[in-house]
Image: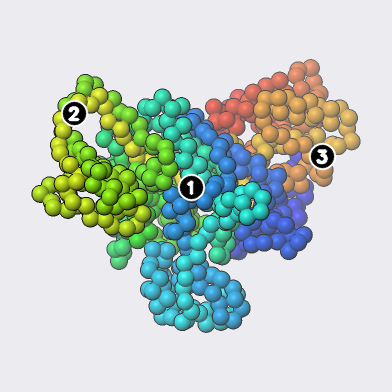
């Protein structure tokens, strides 16, 4: 069973210098991913996951679900991918979900202006730069259209909303939008979800599903697309009472790139632990720090190269106005390890997840725009007597003075008293806003006073901590970081060093000779046994054994089982040869033990090195 008996195709052996081109070529040839609808010319930003890619993506999703849903004790939902317009009015997506667009005056091609700057200057993060400054940078650096080469200096940079609009129902119907994130499906359903959580904080809700953004210039294969999969956790917490189990991840090592280091002339990474970073204030939110620690462990488990991985803090211009702290998990995709880089700016760094403390922004917005309650009642250990501001508007005078708006003004006075009672103190008039208009009301008509009240508890609008993962980008990272090349038996080899737990196929089974009925029969029995044990298995009897090994190496199958004549001879149980992908080491294992042993290695309960101490090596 020498691996030097044959060579794989020229396409497999050819070393492609450009890492991105190599991944794209391999992904298309071996069925990881490829452009959709190519029979009709295709449309940029849409990709189909082939058999290998779909399996890899499914395994990454399952691993994420196990980590962030099952092990953290959270619940999972599945919401529709289309929502009516009011949802996105409340969330702010209709007004503020924009990217910067610049259009070529010659060919009419649209480009993301911030990406042009990042690709052609030393500026790392141009998304946070104001539009007038972006226009100046385009002129200063004499940027040209990547499509036709025309000059872009002087062209207007405009905001472009990324939402996909649709119509719900026949005819003009009801306006709706394809969701740009899975989060809103969780936030909108909070009034019901809190009941399932027995109205007790903290609790978390996860969702894995498709999202849609009408990207101006999709690029890098499945890294930036118009349809993609997100895995998100919304953790609802009482900001005054709930603390994360930080000790669970306190000693986890993380590589941080804080905003202060990004803004420094020769800023560097902060190599630290989660506990130290939270204690020192480098990570402002202990909840965000906790989830960074959990994520670090998960990324390592699925095969992300920790020497090509970091957490980068958002600069002030990037961070959403409602987020007090936000970090991105970023992976390097050009093959430049941190140890070989000149500094943090070196390499092709890409966001693959975001970790944000969103405060009560989302639930407050939906409460404001809907008729539902987005609060949770926190009961005191003992009733408390407190002074509360109270207004009792005199409707007999408000009505004649303000007509049909009087009731809304009365409600606005109630809200003002709760939020800013000082506005009524020693004031002749108070000002309130109704439907965008300002109204001045005689303070005496409000009948403001402080009243002693006994309360059993308080209604709390939960704060939200959100770890949000791009599944497609994570899959690309896993592929990029798993791509390896070496020489086996004097032959060049390309292989994908996937972790067994996420590899598209766990085991390849080969009868050494495809025309030997006894070998073929046993090979089929082995396939059935392994599948019954829950392992994904492929059967291959095409070509010589070296070619079959190379095919499985290139799609990342961690183990290959060969049924040969030697294994069925003798008085004992039948045996097979098990080959490990990375080392190409081979062991002879009895068939009755095979499923149990391989299941243990794939799930991580034992290692292949442990098997090497128990079973006979095959040269």
Label count reads 3
**From mark 1 to mark 3, how far is it between C-alphas?**
55 Å
Q: Quadrant of residue 103?
A: bottom right
Nearest the camera: 311 or 90? 90
Binning the other alpha carbons within 10 Å of mark 2 as few (below 14), some (14 to 19) or many (20 upward) gives few
The residue indicated by pointer 2 is 453
**Residue 522: x percent and y percent?**
81, 26
**From mark 3 to mark 2, how far is it between C-alphas?**
81 Å
Q: Residue at x 43, y 80 (%)?
A: 139
Q: Residue at x 61, y 59 (%)?
A: 45
Nearest the camera: 312 or 383? 383
Q: Residue at x 25, y 43 (%)?
A: 396
Q: Residue at x 72, y 46 (%)?
A: 551
Q: Quadrant of the C terminus?
A: top right
* Label 3 close to label 2 by CB (< 8 Å): no
**Residue 570: x percent and y percent?**
80, 20
């Amino acid at each position: 069973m020498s691996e030097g008996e044959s060579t794989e195709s020229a396409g497999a052996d050819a070393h492609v210098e450009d890492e991105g081109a190599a991944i794209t070529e391999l992904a298309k040839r071996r069925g990881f991913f490829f452009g959709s609808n190519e029979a009709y010319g295709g449309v940029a930003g849409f990709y189909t996951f082939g058999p290998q890619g779909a399996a890899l993506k499914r395994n990454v999703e399952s691993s994420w679900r196990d980590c962030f849903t099952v092990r953290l004790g959270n619940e999972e939902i599945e919401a529709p991918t289309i929502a009516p317009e009011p949802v996105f009015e409340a969330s702010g997506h209709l007004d503020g979900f924009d990217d910067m667009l610049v259009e070529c005056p010659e060919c009419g091609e649209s480009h993301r202006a911030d990406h042009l700057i990042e690709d052609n200057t030393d500026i790392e993060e141009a998304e946070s730069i104001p539009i007038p400054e972006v226009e100046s940078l385009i002129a200063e650096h004499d940027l040209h259209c990547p499509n036709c080469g025309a000059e872009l200096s002087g062209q207007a940079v405009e905001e472009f909303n990324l939402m996909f609009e649709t119509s719900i129902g026949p005819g003009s119907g009801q306006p709706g939008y394809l969701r740009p994130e899975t989060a809103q499906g969780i936030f909108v359903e909070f009034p019901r979800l809190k009941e399932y959580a027995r109205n007790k904080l903290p609790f978390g809700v996860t969702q894995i599903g498709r999202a849609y953004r009408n990207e101006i210039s999709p690029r890098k294969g499945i890294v930036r697309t118009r349809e993609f999969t997100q895995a998100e956790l919304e953790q609802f917490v009482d900001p005054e009472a709930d603390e994360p189990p930080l000790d669970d991840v306190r000693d986890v090592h993380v590589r941080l790139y804080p905003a202060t280091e990004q803004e420094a002339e020769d800023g560097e990474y902060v190599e630290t632990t989660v506990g130290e970073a939270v204690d020192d204030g480098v990570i402002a939110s202990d909840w965000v720090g906790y989830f960074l620690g959990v994520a670090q462990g998960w990324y390592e488990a699925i095969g992300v190269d920790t020497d090509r991985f970091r957490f980068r803090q958002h600069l002030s211009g990037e961070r959403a106005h409602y987020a007090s702290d936000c970090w991105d998990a970023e992976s390097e995709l050009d093959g430049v390890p941190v140890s070989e880089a000149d500094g943090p700016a070196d390499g092709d760094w890409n966001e693959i997840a975001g970790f944000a403390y969103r405060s009560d922004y989302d639930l407050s917005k939906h409460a404001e725009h809907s008729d539902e309650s987005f609060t949770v009642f926190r009961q005191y250990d003992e009733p408390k007597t407190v002074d509360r501001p109270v207004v009792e508007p005199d409707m007999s005078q408000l009505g004649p003075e303000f007509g049909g708006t009087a009731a809304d003004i009365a409600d606005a006075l109630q809200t003002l008293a709760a939020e800013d009672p000082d506005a009524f103190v020693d004031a002749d008039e108070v000002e309130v806003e109704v439907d965008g208009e300002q109204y001045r009301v005689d303070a005496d008509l409000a009948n403001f006073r402080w009243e002693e009240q006994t309360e059993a508890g308080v209604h709390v609008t939960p704060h939200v901590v959100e770890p949000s993962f791009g599944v497609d980008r994570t899959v690309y990272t896993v592929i990029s970081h798993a791509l390896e090349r070496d020489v086996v038996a004097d032959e060049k080899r390309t292989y994908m060093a996937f972790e067994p737990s996420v590899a598209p196929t766990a085991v390849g089974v080969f009868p050494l000779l495809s025309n030997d009925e006894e070998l073929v029969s046993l090979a089929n029995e082995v396939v059935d046994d392994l599948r019954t044990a829950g392992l994904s298995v492929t059967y291959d009897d095409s070509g010589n054994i070296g070619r079959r090994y190379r095919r499985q190496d290139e799609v990342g199958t961690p183990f290959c089982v060969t049924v040969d004549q030697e294994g069925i001879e003798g008085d004992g149980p039948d045996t097979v040869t098990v080959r490990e992908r990375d080392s190409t080491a081979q062991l002879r294992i009895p068939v009755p033990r095979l499923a149990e042993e391989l299941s243990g290695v794939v799930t991580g309960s034992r290692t292949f090195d442990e098997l090497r101490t128990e079973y006979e090596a095959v040269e």
